[in-house]
Image (cartoon, rainbow, N blue to C red):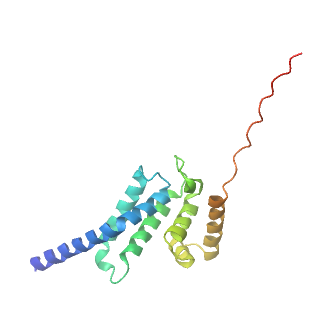
């Protein structure tokens, strides 16, 4: 009985290691986009990924035919949504940094991960129309960023008489 359990645990660990070897890079990229951290300095994204993968590992035996990547991505999105929507102390960087966490989450899921509008709405518990509106507004901000203040006019030299 113990040998059977040990063999099952070893198989489970090998399967999960193979999954992580194939999916961790893409999931880390998604987490980095969500946190809007620089790719080479992304501690929040790494913590988010680690927690998501740990939760995926815990439920590994219960997946039963479900796509483990979808489950890990869903866990990543839910963890980000629960932990990031309150105001943050530090401003996020990059093009996605000007978006709110909710806008960033919807844009990353829709554009970078290719998740359908209905699935995003169900995952976040929002009406589909709300997801559509947030997505459109966020894309508008990304594609047409607000202009900064107008430059100061050049100083005129005083005419000497």
Q: Nearer the viewer, residue 158 or 132?
A: 158
Q: Give the percent coordinates (x, y) of residue 40.
A: 41, 50
Q: Quadrant of the C terminus?
A: top right
In the drawing, does residue 35 fall left or right of residue 130? Answer: left
Q: Hey, which quadrant is residue 27 in on the image?
A: bottom left
User: In front: 7, or 24?
Assistant: 24
Residue 117: give x, y in percent of width and height: 57, 76
Q: Is residue 153 left or right of residue 62?
A: right
Q: In this picture, is 16 found above or below 37?
A: below
Report the residue that reaches farthest toward the bottom.
65
Question: Which quarter of the rendered picture does the N terminus lie within?
Answer: bottom left
Q: Residue furthest top?
A: 161
Pick the front one: 98 or 152: 152
Location of residue 16 with respect to 45 vertically, above or below: below
Quadrant in the picture for residue 139: bottom right
Residue at 22 percent of width and 71 percent of height: 13
Residue 32's x, y, as percent?
45, 58
Compared across the picture, whether 97 is left or right of 8 comes to: right
Instruction: Identify which residue is drawn at 19% across, 74% down.
Output: 9
Give the image location of residue 62, x and y in percent.
Answer: 31, 79
Above or below, comparing residue 23 to residue 35 in the picture: below
Which residue is found at the position 60% from the left and 71% from the top? 131
Above or below residue 59? Residue 90 is: above
The image quadrant that residue 96 belongs to is bottom right
Identify the residue at image location x=34%, y=79%: 63
């Amino acid at each position: 009985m113990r040998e059977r359990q040990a063999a099952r645990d070893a198989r489970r660990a090998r399967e999960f290691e193979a999954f992580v070897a194939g999916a961790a890079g893409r999931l880390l990229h998604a987490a980095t986009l969500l946190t809007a951290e620089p790719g080479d300095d992304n501690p929040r994204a790494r913590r988010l990924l680690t927690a998501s993968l740990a939760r995926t590992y815990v439920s590994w035996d219960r997946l039963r035919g479900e796509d483990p990547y979808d489950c890990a991505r869903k866990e990543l999105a839910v963890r980000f949504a629960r932990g990031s929507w309150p105001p943050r102390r530090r401003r996020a960087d990059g093009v996605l940094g000007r978006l709110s966490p909710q806008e960033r989450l919807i844009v990353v899921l829709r554009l970078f991960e290719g998740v359908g509008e209905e699935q995003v709405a169900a995952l976040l518990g929002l009406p589909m129309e709300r997801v559509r509106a947030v997505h459109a507004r966020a894309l508008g901000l990304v594609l047409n960023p607000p202009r900064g203040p107008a430059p100061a006019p050049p100083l005129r030299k005083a005419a000497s008489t």
